[in-house]
């Protein structure tokens, strides 16, 4: 049976990958939803009822997308912190960090 060895370089590569995802999320995606082109609902046409129905659906879509992006943002922050902790502690993760990571994977929001 092969033994597994702690590889801090592999954790650092993965941590850096997550940092890049987080930077893209915070630098490009979230701003476009908060203040960019996706902040405003598009024009939905002139047929009777189209604007009213589509506006409600777009508002629901926007709110759900915003909430999911914030959950993703919190999860990325937690994963990055956990990986950094593991790197600094030779593969040992603090109990609180491990608990927080488990809560994040279950959908709890640690950053509200």
Image: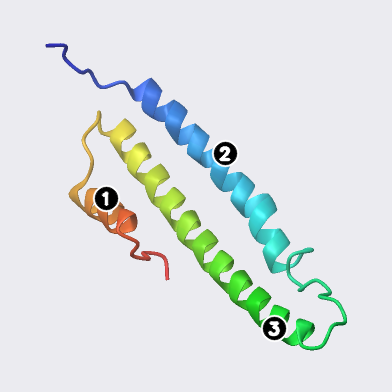
Residue underneath mark 1? 97
Instruction: Quadrant for residue 1, please give it.
Output: top left
**Is 63 displayed left or right of 71 in the figure?**
right
Q: Which of marks 1 and 3 is nearer the N terminus?
A: 3
**Is 42 displayed left or right of 97 in the figure?**
right
Residue that protrudes farthest toward the front in the picture: 47
Q: Counting other residues with Cα less than 10 Å from the Cα at mark 1, is it few (<14), some (14-19), or many (20 or more)? A: some
- The percent coordinates of residue 82 (x first, y second) are 33, 43
- The percent coordinates of residue 75 (x first, y second) are 42, 53
**Is 37 displayed left or right of 80 in the figure?**
right
**Which is more foreground, mark 1 or mark 2?**
2
Q: Earlier in the sequence, mark 1 or mark 2?
A: 2
- The percent coordinates of residue 19 (x first, y second) are 52, 40
83 vs 56: above or below: above
Cα–Cα gap, marks 1 and 2: 21 Å
Residue 20 circle label: 2
Q: Quadrant of the C terminus?
A: bottom left
> Given contact means CB atoms under 8 Å apart, are the residues at marks 1 and 3 in contact?
no
- The percent coordinates of residue 98 (x first, y second) are 24, 48
Q: Name the residue nearer the viewer: 43 or 62.
A: 43
Residue underneath mark 3? 53
At mark 3, the secondary structure is helix
Q: Residue at x 36, y 64 (%)?
A: 110
Residue that protrudes farthest toward the right in the picture: 46
Q: Residue at x 84, y 83 (%)?
A: 47
101 vs 10: above or below: below
């Amino acid at each position: 049976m092969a033994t597994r060895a702690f590889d801090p370089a592999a954790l650092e590569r993965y941590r850096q990958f997550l940092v890049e995802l987080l930077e893209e999320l915070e630098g490009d995606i979230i701003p476009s939803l908060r203040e960019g082109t996706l902040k405003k609902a598009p024009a939905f046409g002139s047929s009777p009822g189209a604007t009213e129905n589509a506006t409600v659906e777009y508002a629901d879509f926007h709110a759900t997308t915003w909430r999911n992006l914030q959950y993703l943002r919190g999860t990325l922050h937690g994963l990055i912190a956990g990986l950094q902790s593991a790197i600094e502690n030779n593969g040992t993760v603090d109990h609180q960090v491990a608990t927080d990571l488990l809560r994040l994977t279950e959908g709890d929001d640690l950053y509200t």
